[in-house]
Amino acid sequence: MDTSSSRNGGRRAKYTTVSIPVTLYNRIKQLIEGTGFTSVSQFVTYVLREIVADMERERLESEEVSEEERKRIIERLKRLGYL
C-alpha cells in the first residue's frame, strides 16, 4: 500500500493512493471548478466520507431490533423460563 503523511491541524494524517480512470478524474476536475474544492482528491475524499457514513448508518439501523422482534424475544425468554 502506498501511503504518505501530512500535517493536518497539528496531527499527522496518513494518506494512500487510489487509482481512478483518467476520464473520471477529468470530469471531476471540470465539475469542481468554481466550487470550494481545491483538488480532485479533496472532492473524492468528501464524497467517500459521505458515502461511508451513510453506509455505516444504514448498517446500524438494520441491526436494530424492531418492537415486534423485541416482543417475540421476550415471549420466547418467558417460555424458556428466563423471565
Image (cartoon, grey):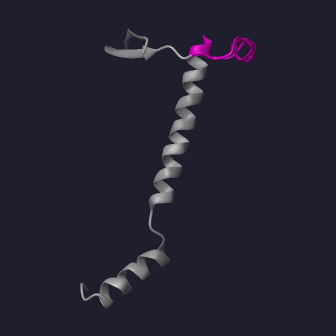
Q: Residue 30: percent from the left, percent from the top?
A: 75, 13
Q: Residue 12: percent from the left, percent from the top?
A: 33, 14
Q: Residue at x 56, y 17 (%)?
A: 42
Q: Residue 1: percent from the left, percent from the top?
A: 42, 15
Left or right: residue 8 versus residue 42 is left
Q: Residue at x 45, y 15 (%)?
A: 16
Q: Residue 79: percent from the left, percent from the top?
A: 32, 90
The residue most toward the left is: 82
Left or right: residue 14 versus residue 32 is left
Left or right: residue 48 versus residue 75 is right
Of the 4 image quadrants, the one containing the C terminus is: bottom left
Q: Residue at x 51, y 58 (%)?
A: 62
Instruction: Identify whether 11 is placed above or below 51.
Output: above
Which range is magenta?
A: 19-41
User: Total number of numbered labels?
Assistant: 0
Tell me if residue 66 is in the magenta stretch. Answer: no
Give the camera-side residue of 2 and 32: 2
The answer to which image quadrant residue 51 occupies is: top right
Q: Residue at x 48, y 45 (%)?
A: 56
Instruction: Identify whether 63 is placed above or below 65.
Output: above
Instruction: Identify whether 55 is placed above or below 42.
Output: below
Left or right: residue 56 versus residue 19 is left
Give the camera-side residue of 10 and 65: 65
The answer to which image quadrant residue 37 occupies is: top right
The residue most toward the front is: 1
Instruction: Identify whether 62 is placed above or below 78.
Output: above
